Image (cartoon, helix red, strand yellow):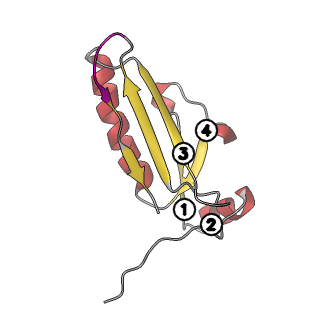
Amino acid sequence: METQTLDFSHVDSLQKAEELFRAGKLERLYVFPLEFGGQEIPQNILYVPHGIAALKARLDGTIAKMVSDGNINSYRAEPEYQGDSFIPSKIKIFAAHNEKPGAFNPTINIW
């Protein structure tokens, strides 16, 4: 049985990513979640394979609980890219409290 490896190196422009989105092959993901105050603006939108947005939403839900418990007061998510691809290969999340020890820093590996 052959394993399929995702490779988005050919998606080297916003136009190509949006075409794949319109064709139903990619989904939108908000880097800074709308429920955390993120905006629906191009700088906050990534295009990713199906399932990645749900995975990030679950992690963001965990972070929201940690915020409500007073354990987190800072958050950032940073996409990481391979070559010229417009599709991130990873999303690194950094959540911490600036006055408490510890942090929650998961990485979503995409391709």
- Looking at the image, which is closer to me, 14 or 77? 77
Q: Quadrant of residue 101?
A: top left
Question: Which is nearer the N-term, disc 3 or disc 1?
Answer: 1
Q: Check disc 2 and give the amino acid type.
A: Leu
Q: Residue at x 32, y 27 (%)?
A: 103
Q: Is residue 45 left or right of residue 59?
A: right
Q: CA distance from mark 4 to mark 1?
A: 16 Å
Question: Which is nearer the N-term, disc 2 or disc 1?
Answer: 2
Q: Is residue 43 left or right of residue 30?
A: right
Q: Residue at x 52, y 39 (%)?
A: 78
Question: Which is nearer the N-term, disc 2 or disc 3?
Answer: 2
4 or 3: mark nearer the eye: 3
Provide the residue designation for mark 1.
Answer: 26
Q: Secondary structure at mark 2?
A: helix
Provide the residue designation for mark 2.
Answer: 20
Whether tag 4 and tag 3 are in contact, CB under 8 A, the answer is: no
Provide the residue designation for mark 4.
Answer: 44
3 or 1: mark nearer the eye: 3
Q: CA distance from mark 4 to mark 3?
A: 11 Å
Q: Check disc 1 and give the amino acid type.
A: Leu
Q: Secondary structure at mark 3?
A: strand
Q: Residue 69, how many percent across, how many down?
A: 25, 17
Tell me which segment is drawn in magenta.
Answer: 99-103
Q: Residue 27, how many percent across, how many down?
A: 53, 57
Provide the residue designation for mark 3.
Answer: 79
Q: CA distance from mark 2 to mark 3?
A: 19 Å
Q: Residue 85, how many percent across, how many down?
A: 64, 61
Whether tag 4 and tag 2 are in contact, CB under 8 A, the answer is: no
Q: Check disc 3 and give the amino acid type.
A: Pro
